[in-house]
Amino acid sequence: MLRLTLAREAHWLDLPMGVRLLVEPLSTALMVAARTDPELRALPSGSPDDAVAVAFAKAIATRAITAWEGVGDATGAPLKVSPEGIAALLDLWPMFEQFQTDYVARGLELDAEKNVSAPLPSGPSAGASATARPAKRAARTARRS
């Protein structure tokens, strides 16, 4: 069953080291905007998947993060949210991994839900009907060389 959440307001996302991000819901509009991000489109054709994944995550984060807590400059003074700051934050592996897991992956769970079937008592194909006619005779054994 599709579980539709009608609440569409921003929420706080907790990351390591006391960092908190106020993020907008991961919507279709946000994903489409991220896919057309100039930084993502500027990647050379045939770029490795990991480079594309990092650029895509940064494009999503730039559009989703509206405020943060626990992020400061070298002297400890709080930093304002900016595309450069978001990119620097996601260059830190623990921050990137937590953002991917708690925000991007959770938002994409809805996409995954549409690809599953209801479980059947005796396996995934127990209730399926045959679509091909039975073979007329058994296949011959392959020759040995």
Image (spheres, rainbow, N blue to C red):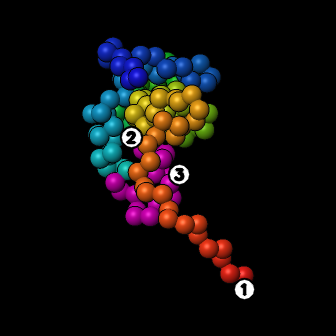
Left or right: 66, with 103 as reference point: left
In depth, the one of 78 and 64 nearer the eye is 64
On screen, 24 above or below 52? above
In depth, the one of 20 and 124 nearer the eye is 124
Which of labels 2 and 1 is toward the front? Answer: 1
Q: Which residue is mark 1?
A: 145
Which of labels 3 and 1 is toward the front? Answer: 1
Q: Whole-percent x and y of residue 119?
A: 52, 29
Residue furthest bottom in the image? 145
Q: Is residue 60 found inside the magenta-colored segment of the image? A: no
Q: Which residue is mark 3?
A: 50
Spatial CA distance of label 3 from label 2 is 14 Å
Name the mark on residue 59: 2
Check disc 3 and report its element: helix, strand or loop.
helix
Q: Amino acid at mark 3?
A: Asp
Whichever of callouts 3 and 1 sits on the residue coming sooner in the sequence is 3
Residue 14, quarter of the rendered image = top right
Residue stretch rendered in magenta on the structure: 41-59
On screen, 10 above or below 142? above
The chief SS type of the magenta part is helix
Spatial CA distance of label 2 from label 1 is 56 Å
In depth, the one of 27 and 2 nearer the eye is 2
Check disc 1 and report its element: helix, strand or loop.
loop
Q: Residue at x 33, y 37 (%)?
A: 31
Residue 110, quarter of the rendered image = top left
Q: Whole-percent x and y of residue 107?
A: 43, 29
Check disc 2 and report its element: helix, strand or loop.
helix
- Local crowd size for mark 2, using a 10 Å CA cut-off: few (<14), some (14–19), many (≥20): many
**Count of marks placed on residues:** 3
Left or right: 141, with 101 as reference point: right
Q: Is residue 43 found inside the magenta-colored segment of the image? A: yes
Q: Residue at x 32, y 29 (%)?
A: 27
